[in-house]
Image (spheres, grey):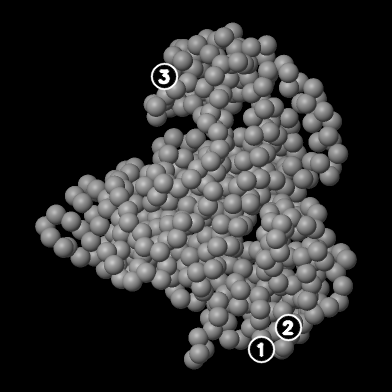
Amino acid sequence: MTTDHQDTDTTILDTDVLVVGAGPAGLMLATELRLGGAEVVVVDQRPGPTTESRASTLHARTMEILDSRGLLDELGTPPCEPRGHFGGVPLDLTLPSSYPGQWKVAQTRTEELLQRRAAVLGADLRRRHQLLSLEAESEGAGRGRAGRGGVEAEAIGPYGPVRIRARYLVGCDGEDSTVRRLVRAPFPGRDAARELLRADVSGVEVADRRFQRLEHGLAIAATREGVTRVMVHEFGRPAAERDGAEPDFAEVTDVWKRVTGEDISQGTPLWVNAFGDANRQLAHYRHGRVLFAGDAAHRQMPSGGQALNLGVQDAFNLGWKLAAVVRGSAGEDLLDTYHSERHTVGRQVLANIRAQVELLLGGPEVEPARALLTELVALDGVRQHLAGMISGLGIRYDVEGVEGCGAEGAGGDDFGAGAAKGVGVGSEIHSDEHPLLGRRLPDAWLEPAEGGARRRTTELLRTGRGLLLSLDGDGAPALRATAAPWSDRVAFVADRPAAGGPLPAGQALLVRPDGYVAWAGSGPAGLARALTRWFGTLAADD
């Protein structure tokens, strides 16, 4: 990255990617871009990581992602609750994973963790910088005002104006995204009709409540380390017109008292906010050289702790793809798979949140539906389906480009378990035959073919490169030869799966940098096509 001073007032920056927003999604994206070899500048209005832990849950798939990048040692061992909920109905989230359940990690810690990693990898993070304008040129445009046919943004920082020229810009700047407004990106959906009031309060003693439905409303309370988080909704009370302002503590205490009969006005509020049931999603996550991730791409009530996790997983999907494009090892069409994959996931998450909102905030009229759901979640197939949806473990991408086989597509809810079942011996196995194709690579033990200590599949993903994993242990010379031209982008590993594990012995798996299986087979047929699709064509001198 080069920095220049055009005059005494304006700082000029050139970079590959400009990320607007340094929340969990923006910071995860920055780490992935740097891991993939792209230069990145991150700008954010705030002076530092959030001091308000509005999100406090990491789900299983997000924990797996952090593990795949070696980040969990810094996080320690946070509290884990195996039970979550769907619309306030208790739901066991246990599924085959090294991290089942929901892990209680304050958003402050998540942001601090990702910011440290981004800095170590060389991301240029600029706090107290507010985006003012942007101009983008489409692919194939000449070198105009936006430099390399990319994006030029204007921001104001603590030392004056800043002009940033980038090949791509990604808006990760939250539900009230400035990038989205400047691009005028269509954001269809509905505004909030109802809301939950929320506050972290010290100096109060109230009983813990887990989605307690009372005569006049819903009350939730949980105390950790002397701070009580309360959330409350009064049945029939519409969302207030707040114009960006937060409610005051008096409003929270008044509604809490009407719903529960308790007085918490003597407490000291640490922060207060309201979140409504608005439900919107961008029509397109990509607008030429401007892309969106996290809450800038979708707005939803954070029911079940899904919002932060959805945003982090957006960034994890996009980062390696965008890095490959700016490096020149992949074409622009790879970015289109970001929209097709994550828009599908986002649409499904927003749909399940809409259903949960009705169950949570609806009055007595929803009690029959709640009673029925309580009976249904006792059926393990129903429980697994809902748990897979909330945890992110149920995602199955359409890696073969077949229309209509998006996230949680064909193949059932295997969640990485029993992957060897029903797998025939053939040169190529399609998505309707192989349980792992399009799903995340399970965290499983491997026995090195040449001896030595066992290792986990997750350890093989730490570099952020692709992986061709041969599970027959003999080195699979035909597979190795096919993948050799991509050796700068895809590591080849020949190991044997540990007995009784979820991996199919005798097979081979091509794994993308984000951990999803892009090809499966026992011979090289179809492998070169998959390598080309996900890791780019080869230059003439490769």
Residue at x-position 63% and y-position 77%: 531
Alpha carbon of mark 3 to alpha carbon of mark 2: how far? Answer: 63 Å
Residue with the mark numbered 1: 481
Disc 1 marks a residue whose amino acid type is Ala
Answer with mark 1 or mark 3, whichever residue precedes in sequence.
3
Residue with the mark numbered 2: 524
Disc 3 marks a residue whose amino acid type is Asp
Residue 126 lies, in percent from the top left, at 31, 53
What label sits on residue 8 in the rendered view? none
Answer with mark 3 or mark 2, whichever residue precedes in sequence.
3
Whether residue 133 is visible to the viewer of this picture, yes or no, is yes
Circle 2 or circle 1, nearest the eye: 2
Residue at x-position 59% and y-position 23%: 221
Classify residue 404 by image quadrant.
Answer: bottom right
User: Observer-nearest residue: 336 or 264?
Assistant: 336
Answer with mark 2 or mark 1, whichever residue precedes in sequence.
1
- Above or below, 56 against 483 in this view is above
Q: Secondary structure at mark 1?
A: helix
Residue with the mark numbered 3: 248
